[in-house]
Amino acid sequence: MLRFVASRLLAVIPVLFVVSCVVFLILRLAPGDPAAVIAGNSATGAEIEQIRAKLGLNESLPVQYGIWISKVLQGDLGHSYFLNKPVSDLILQRLEPTASLALGTIVLAILLAVPLGTVAASRMGGGLDRLLSVISVAGFSVPVFVTGYVLIYLFSIQLQWLPVQGYEPLSGKGGLWAWARQLILPWLALSIIYVALIARITRASVSEALTEDYIRTARAKGLHERAVLLRHALRNAAVPIVTVIGIGVALLIGGVVVTETVFAIPGLGSLTVDVVLNRDFPVIQGLVLFFAVSYVVINLLVDLSYLLLDPRIRY
């Protein structure tokens, strides 16, 4: 088991190195001059050159990368060109809304998708199974922003049950309900695609597990069908389900950007849109690196969870 954990931890190091190189090079090789953007349209060539020298943009790419990565390892992601704040501070300020949206979406999707997929697998060809197929197709086909606007029209404009846009901090005066009330519609809009994804994989994995010999043995021993389904079939189908949940985080990152824009949530997604429009390269670099590292860490945790879900991996 220790060898498995050590191998996964060591495998993260080259992945993070490649990620840092890609993040650095994409922005450095992108069209446009950051110094010219900062200086403005009326700046002279001398002023632009002065800004380039101040930012270290005249150095070679290896030297720029060495300076940048050494600062990153010390927790310094740079300084925003336009907002005049450290990038790490900007990320921390916007982290709570994004974390609330992302974690709530994943939890809601798992609570809905796993039971749906499990029951559909136990009743192949039934009404719930066909309904799940329709939901899956709709979830993958309809863009997040379309779902968001439909939910806003129904529940905010027509029924006036929920607020249209905005975010209430968890530590705010309204407390837990005010926080959750602002996020119900974003959670629903963003979770639909994950419900479709996780439910389909759950259905396929559980239905395959139900054909195994140990399921027939459990039934022959007189176990209740619910125990057979939950304790044997679902438990042995957990590895692919957890895997697809980890993979879904990559889709979640893109969905967060769109959802926060639709519902005016001041999180990392809306910050990403703002800094891209302003070509604020240090913030873009920091955000991309943050999202990439988060994805790598989550996939590492998914790999380590296999030790608990499948004891055979320990050997």
Image: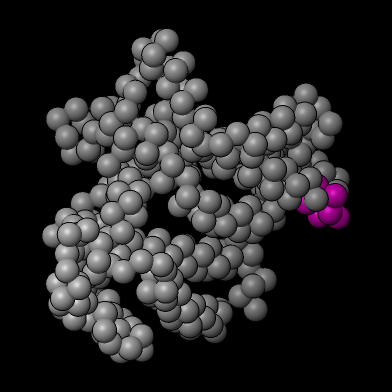
Task: Tell me, yes or no, whether the highlighted magenta stretch contains residue 234.
Answer: no
Q: Tell me: 93 left or right of 204.
A: left
Q: Residue at x 65, y 36 (%)?
A: 141
Residue 97 location, x and y as percent? Answer: 30, 43
Q: Residue at x 76, y 39 (%)?
A: 121
- The one nearer the camera, 83 or 268, is 83
Quarter of image, res 290: bottom left
Q: Tell me: 154 left or right of 284.
A: right
- The one nearer the camera, 179 or 126, is 179
Q: Is residue 82 above or below residue 158?
A: below
Q: Residue furthest top?
A: 158
- The one nearer the camera, 197 or 4, is 197
Q: Is residue 16 above or below residue 296?
A: below
Q: Residue at x 39, y 63 (%)?
A: 288
- The one nearer the camera, 278 or 226, is 278
Task: Tell me, yes or no, whether the highlighted magenta stretch contains residue 212.
Answer: yes
Quarter of image, res 69: bottom left
Residue 282 location, x and y as percent? Answer: 27, 66
Q: Is residue 63 above or below residue 289?
A: below
Residue 87 location, x and y as percent? Answer: 22, 63
Q: Is residue 16 above or below residue 133?
A: below
Residue 299 location, x and y as percent? Answer: 51, 65
Would residue 70 be visible to someone looking at this image? no
Q: Residue at x 47, y 50 (%)?
A: 254
Quadrant where the N terminus sits is: bottom right
Q: Which residues are magenta?
A: 209-214
Q: Tell me: 218 left or right of 37.
A: right
